[in-house]
Image (cartoon, rainbow, N blue to C red):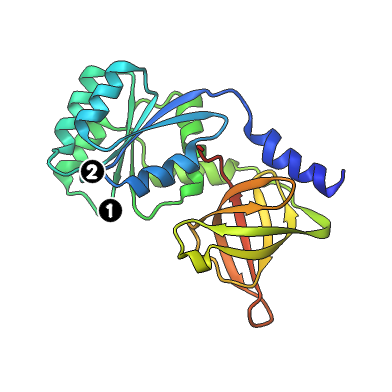
Amino acid sequence: MTDREKVSLYTGGAYNGAKKWKLLIVDDNETICALLSAVLNSGDCVVSCALTGAQALEMLRERPIDICFLDLCLPGVNAEELMVQIRKQAPATRIVMITGGDPDEAAMREFRKHAILLLVKPFDLFLLEDIVREVMDKNITTYHDYEAVVANLIGEKRRHDRHPFTASEGYSLHLSGAPERDLRASVDAVDISQSGLGIRTSIPLEPGRIVRLCNNNETICGMVRWSVAGARESNYRAGIQFLKLDE
């Protein structure tokens, strides 16, 4: 298999399956909505977003939703009351709560009653799709401990083989949200797997940054999963997780 065929296979073939599970992200932070959508909007999932509780209920009336990712701290909304409304209006929808802190025992009692999972920030973004698959494949409808679910996933998770390029593949790197002067940099892709690229670059890349890699043949959307300094100054290695971003 040539290097060009490797890129075509892993950036195209792995993520073009039929849409399957319907997800709803409810968060007033548009950046969080975009980030979670980018991580989850793969061949197995189609993602919608709501910025308010009222918008979420309206969307749930219009279409069936398999899993609702619900932020605990929506402005002007009691999350526990909203959970009850969701359960009444869409009883088949599973609720995954997202919070930035440790809820008290009273809140936890409500979560266990109405939700199936509690995600406490920061959590591993790259396990989210595996969590969705676990919930749907095993038909989880009652509350589960996050750590137990993750331990099970890591134990079962199959690691993708890496395939080095015979010659480094050059790309222009576009950083989302950076000042115009910092939007572009040259990088070399050194290996590829079904889940992402290993690259070498002259600039540090923060984990979580969404990037586009472009050359004359294709544009690849991805997120920086890890980044380390190389042996020489201005020499960095990074792992890029493939993402499918809506245009």
Answer with the quarter of the image where residue 170 lies. Answer: bottom right
Instruction: Name the residue at 54% across, 29% down.
Output: 44
Q: Position of residue 94 (x, y in %)?
A: 34, 27
Answer with the quarter of the image where residue 37 lies. Answer: top left
Report the amino acid beneath label 2. Answer: Leu
* Along the viewing direction, whichever of 240 and 151 lies nearer the viewer: 240
Mark 1 and mark 2 lie on one chain; the one further toward the N terminus is 2
Q: Are marks 1 and 2 in contact (CB under 8 Å)?
A: yes
Structural crowding at the residue carrying mark 2, measured as other residues with C-alpha within 10 Å and reported as few (<14), some (14–19) or many (≥20)? many
Report the amino acid beneath label 1. Answer: Gly
Instruction: Name the residue at 37% across, 22% down.
Output: 65
* Along the viewing direction, whichever of 96 and 202 lies nearer the viewer: 202
Label 1's element?
Answer: loop
Q: Is residue 171 left or right of residue 155?
A: right
The residue pinned by badge 2 equals: 72
Q: Is residue 156 left or right of residue 167?
A: left
- The residues bearing labels 1 and 2 have C-alpha atoms spaced at a distance of 8 Å
Q: Is residue 16 left or right of residue 152?
A: right
The residue pinned by badge 1 equals: 100
Q: Position of residue 27 (x, y in %)?
A: 29, 41
* Along the viewing direction, whichever of 102 and 83 lies nearer the viewer: 83
Structural crowding at the residue carrying mark 1, measured as other residues with C-alpha within 10 Å and reported as few (<14), some (14–19) or many (≥20)? few
